[in-house]
Amino acid sequence: MNSALIEEYYAKIKSEADAKIETLREKPVVWIGTASCGKAAGAEKVKEAFEQAIKNNNLDVRVIEVGCMGYCYAEPLAVISKPGFPSICYGYVDEGLANRLVEDFLMGEDPCYEYALVALEANDYFPTFSDFPRGVYEEKIILEHCGFIDPGDIDHYIAREGYAALAKALRMRPEEIISEMKDSMLRGRGGAGFPTGIKWETCRMAEGEPKYVICNGDEGDPGAFMDRNILESNPHQVIEGMIICAYAVGASRGYLYIRAEYPQAIMQVKKAIQQARGKGLLGSRVMGSEFGFDLEVFEGSGAFVCGEETALISSMEGKMGIPRQRPPHPAVSGFHDKPTVLNNVKTFCYVPPVIRKGADWFKSTGTPESPGTAVFSLVGKVSCTGLVEVPMGTTLRNVIFDVGEGTPGEKGFKAVQIGGPSGGCLPESALDLPIDFDSLQEAGAIMGSGGLVVMDEDDCMVAVARFFLEFTQHESCGKCTFCRLGTRQMLDLLTDITKGEGKPEHLETLRELAEDIKAGSLCNLGKTAPNPVLTTLRYFRDEYEAHINERVCPARMCPELIVFYIAPEKCSKLCNVCVGSCPTEAVYTREDGLKAINQEKCVKCNNCLKACPPEYNAVIKLSPPELLKEKEGNQ
């Protein structure tokens, strides 16, 4: 490669981007987070309110749509950058606040700090994460630019050193790139944690042409949205990583496999590909070099099993999304039986910073065996939901209670499900475990793709295990007898237990079935499907025994084992909201004016409990034995 030509090429597009972005420093800018989470919270109406107010007042202010900063709990988010002031991030923005910020801050000198989440430090062009309250715990590598650049404008990414790693890589030999990746010890972030450099080296050394690079964006875990938000917020970092990979392994064609349920991600990626082609970063002569590579999007149909790499490849070939026997691995014989590198969205995101800053820099974060960071979607019974990126080795307690600020209200923490439906449920005693591939596996869980679901004392761990097993059983492709029939049998046993129809011997049967399914399944969907059951049996066995021996759900969550009861001493004759909330007319007014529930009509929808005013708190959820004691106490 002509190093001078490539260096000159990059300097040219960087200079053009800098000149374009320089104009943002001269005038006020409003950045609106319009990723899927922002839109769901009403960001589009907030954007329209800002634009209308700016237009009505004839202001010279730009409104720019950005992606997700990770602080989903406070959406809609808006950041205002105005010369002479720090960049200020506002949370929970509605149309009224948008109008006030225009009048008081953009037209005046009042930043309305009472509505600000934080005043941010500003770098050369854009605000940064460094001053967020939880920023002390996080370290942004993958999410560094998410929420602070326009994903629909390639110059925003280039102005922040985007594609500098590609320019550097094209001046290296492919073997040097692979050596750097191996030295970095970057492990795949799709769940398995396989060393990235070794996978690339295997593909490069494999016989067969052409070679392919595929990005797995088929994110199907309940509660997981890391890949979606990255593709919506910063698609160019993924694309840059794929181009570097293609150059290293000798591929000329690549695909981004994205599930069709992610329309905004698909739209942003397609737009980014077009812009990259326009800049000469994709096509027959990348950056004017002799290397040619191009990308296109393949829309998946939403089958969870297609997250498994061989099933994904089969679906791309027009076949059923069913896993294949390995070996051979895709790196040797993959798409159309040709050598194929298949990595996760987050894995490709790491590639540009690793190449640009070096393997030693990457290994300075995290643990010796699991360097770098971990990205999680923090959801469930936690105060501050959203995206979290922390150094490997950070404890679960730190993520949940320092970053996520713990469980809301007065409810106590009970468990955390890590690794998606194939992960494990870990109790409070495991919260001081460091987050890395090996420690989690020893505890019975897996890193997975990064879903982190927090549960409190109102969650029944038997019902939770049943929920996740029902999901994986439904998503099983059916190829393996152990997975197809074994998970069905486990699900039937769990259903019986949650109905109070379980038997003591069912616990040992569940354990034996789980071990057989793990040993006999072809792909990791089957091998890991029993993890929620095994970990809840390991850490919450007392709940299983209560369901079986006492016919009681300690968390009062399983419908067959609970009843709703209105305490007469708390009920008000003047209040009728519970009567109106009941869809089956099970709640009725007694002769004395107080309310009661006809248990034969009650469908346990929970409406009456939600509707009862907190000053009365008369509706109580009990187990049948508790109800009997309650009634005896009132007689």
Image: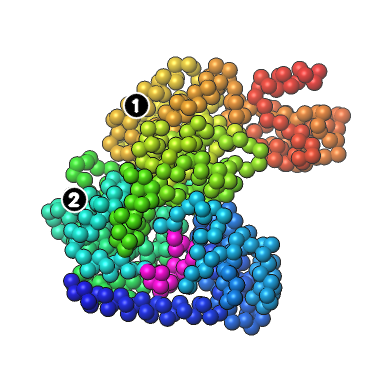
Assign a secondary structure to mark 1: helix
- Kind of residue sitting beneath label 2: Thr
**Residues drawn in magenta:** 143-161
Label 2 sits on residue:
202
Q: For label 2, count other residues whose C-alpha is less than 10 Å away and answer few (under 14), some (14-19) or many (20+).
A: some
Assign a secondary structure to mark 2: helix
From where the camera sits, is residue 467 visible?
no
Residue 592 against residue 327 in the figure, above or below: above
Prevailing secondary structure class for the magenta stretch in the rendered image: loop
Image x and y of residue 79, in percent? 57, 67
Q: In what quadrant of the picture does the C terminus appear? A: top right
Residue 559 appears left or right of 258: right
In this rendered view, identify the residue nearer to me: 414 or 47: 414
Residue 217 appears left or right of 559: left
In this rendered view, identify the residue nearer to me: 503 or 417: 417
Q: In what quadrant of the picture does the N terminus appear? A: bottom left
**Residue 609 is a magenta residue:** no
